[in-house]
Amino acid sequence: MSTSDIETRARRVLAATQEPLICAYLYGSHARGTGAAESDVDIAVLLSAYVGQQGLLGPLPRLRGALERVLEREVDLIDMRSAPPDLIHRILSEGVLLVDRARDQRIAFEVQARNTYFDLLPYLRLYREGRAA
């Protein structure tokens, strides 16, 4: 399945969901166009509220199941509210916006997430260089 097919099918599932979805991004190898046939699909979602660990009954497992059925492959679905700042930055920089139901809320989240990332960036660099105190 091509990246274009993955985007189209994922958009259809996400656009039709009744879950409290603000937006969703395709990221990782398929967003870069380098995904192999056996690669999982990485999708990040921003829900209208933090869902935490809701087990099998929450919106994330329901969305993951719907996406896996349509995409016919494993989906790594993450809640952007609980993702680390450097991953969110990568998603926003390299990802493909699949669904945008609430533009103002999405932009507010993105601004806050980018500010957090750039505030932490000097410390992340020190940590990665092995100089963290």
Image: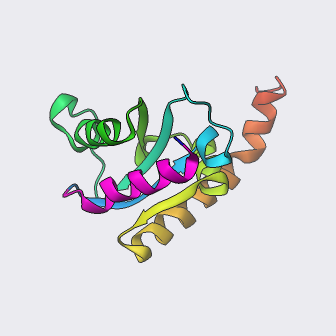
Does residue 101 appear in the picture of this structure? Answer: yes
Judged left or right of residue 65, residue 38 is right
Look at the magenta stretch and give its main secondary structure: helix
Residue 98 in percent (x, y) is at 46, 60
Instruction: Tell me the quarter of the image containing the C terminus.
Output: top right
Residue at 45 percent across and 67 percent down: it is: 106
Residue 37 in percent (x, y) is at 56, 30
Judged left or right of residue 79, residue 125 is right
Identify the image quadrant of residue 87: top right
Residue at 41 percent across and 29 percent down: it is: 74
Q: Residue furthest front?
A: 1
Say whether residue 130 is magenta.
Answer: no
How are the residues colored? rainbow
Residue at 68 percent across and 46 percent down: it is: 32
Does residue 28 appear in the picture of this structure? Answer: no
Residue at 46 percent across and 44 percent down: it is: 43
Up-down relation of residue 133 to residue 83 (above or below)? above
Q: Residue furthest left?
A: 57
Up-down relation of residue 78 to residue 116 (above or below)? above
Up-down relation of residue 117 to residue 61 (above or below)? below
Residue 100 in percent (x, y) is at 41, 68
Of the pair 87 and 35, the residue shown nearer to us: 35
Residue 97 in percent (x, y) is at 52, 61
Count the marks: 0
Judged left or right of residue 117, residue 104 is left
Magenta-colored span: 2-18
